Image (cartoon, rainbow, N blue to C red):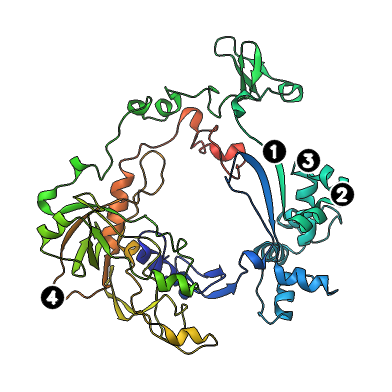
Amino acid sequence: MWTNPDGLSWIEALTDESKVGRHVCLTPTWSETAWFADYVLPMGHASERHDLMSQETHAARWIGFRQPVLRMALEKQGKKFNFTYEAHREAGLGEVWEEDEFWIELSWRVDPDGSMGIRRYFESPYRPGEKIRIDEYYRWIFENSVPGLPQAAANEGLTPLDYMRKYGAFLVENNVYELHRKVLKPEELQGSTVDPVTHVVKKNGASIGIQIDGNPVAGFPTPSCKLEFYSKTLKDWHWPEHSIPGYIKSHVHRDNIDAAKGEMLLLPTFRLPTLIHTRSGNAKWLYEISHKNPVWMHHEDAERLGVVTGDLVRVQTAIGYFIDRVWATEGMRPGVIACSHHLGRWRLKEDFGGERWSTALVDLKQTEPGKWMMRTIHGIQPFDSDDPDSSRIHWEDAGVHQNLTFPVQPDPISGQHCWHQKVTVSRARTEDRYGDVFVDTDRAHEEYRRWLQMSRAAPGPGNLRRPLWMIRVYRPAAEAFYLPVK
């Protein structure tokens, strides 16, 4: 609710039982979203759960294995647990679950006899008909899904799971370059055909590679298996004018901004190097360094508006406005303003509803149907806790929650949200206060529908709802790509 645009529409939905009958928030921390939940279930952070990860750190394929530190430490002392939350309870943290175990347990509660077809996906591959355990879940992955890991573990006299518990990471392949030149293996080519014109290698109707000088190679992940200058996909999906690369004027192109009316481009997505997305609230030293997100503005624009650093301005979006302070700087281009991410966290009660290192206490009310107003009661203040540093807080600013005022702007082609905002900037009015946020959710819905009208509706070829060849992290069944035939 805090991160997404148009968060007040989320609040309207979450507080309307005809739309959301029961809201359960699985979260490691208190948040604005959790405040509007019926149940808040504490979930473990990275060091409190099992998890897999890999990142683009270098030209290699590798996998990392996170483990719940307290559970592992207690088990090394000879204690045994069926669930990670039992170890956390033993260590005094309370019943903090890890999500893998939660979904396994919930699935068995929902489908206890397997008649709904859900439970079978959460049964042990080693003990047929029994509930899968967390160590079995990762044991199966490491034995069957990580090339080279079983052999590396065997070389050390370990099982793949024990290997990953010991080392925490495994290098699958190093120096990964030029994957498009990878020669297809005979087993991959079995049952395939080669188009005599395009030389694309197809199997079961899908492109798996291309013949180059008679050699079948993987190519690129496109329908032609080549780097495409001309995209038949865009033509087939009703965007022929973009089937070859060109310049597309966005909604915040200078031609679409009327400077005479005070319109400007707001960049709301830039990040500070001292904070981590929206997840730094408990990091007291980082918040001591960075706890405000002023509107960065070029001196020429500041002079035109008659403001200087520290003055308040009203930033009007398509659905509302927020009030923030100016920071005049030569670091911005004239006509463009910026307001950093991370900040503007808030809570609705003095003593709970959000950690107090980074949240302001606010008053949030619906002044009339669809009209919402938020006003800061007070910013960050010293407070008593087990940490003596909480009484030493010397800053008050918590920043401004700008995302609430952004409409949902789905890109007409990809559907992804367009974060950049066309705004009107003016000096704050007499009634405005720092941190004020106003949103008209009726206007937000109208703006969303306006953006939808810019799209070009499916179906594509063969009644598809989206191209079959596009990569997805977890690919649905092929039939899910097709619209139902009426």
Whole-percent x and y of residue 156? 87, 49
Q: Relative to 47, does residue 258 appear above or below in the rendering?
A: above
Q: CA distance from mark 3 to mark 1?
A: 9 Å
Q: CA distance from mark 4 to mark 2?
A: 73 Å
**Three-letter amino acid code at disc 1?**
Glu
Q: Are marks 2 and 3 in contact (CB under 8 Å)?
A: no
Q: Earlier in the sequence, mark 4 or mark 2?
A: 2
Point out the frontmost of discs 3 and 4.
Answer: 3
Q: Are marks 3 and 1 in contact (CB under 8 Å)?
A: yes
Which residue is depicted at the point 32% across and 69% down? 400
Point out the image quarter for the N terminus. Answer: bottom left
Whole-percent x and y of residue 482? 53, 36
Q: Picture quarter containing residue 472?
A: top right
Q: Is residue 373 visible?
A: yes
Question: Residue 173 has which mark?
Answer: 1
- The residue under label 3 is 148
**Three-letter amino acid code at disc 4?**
Thr
Q: Are marks 3 and 4 in contact (CB under 8 Å)?
A: no
Residue closer to the observer: 364 or 226? 226
Q: Relative to 10, does residue 147 appear above or below in the rendering?
A: above
Tell which residue pokes out farthest to the right in this image: 157
Q: Earlier in the sequence, mark 3 or mark 1?
A: 3
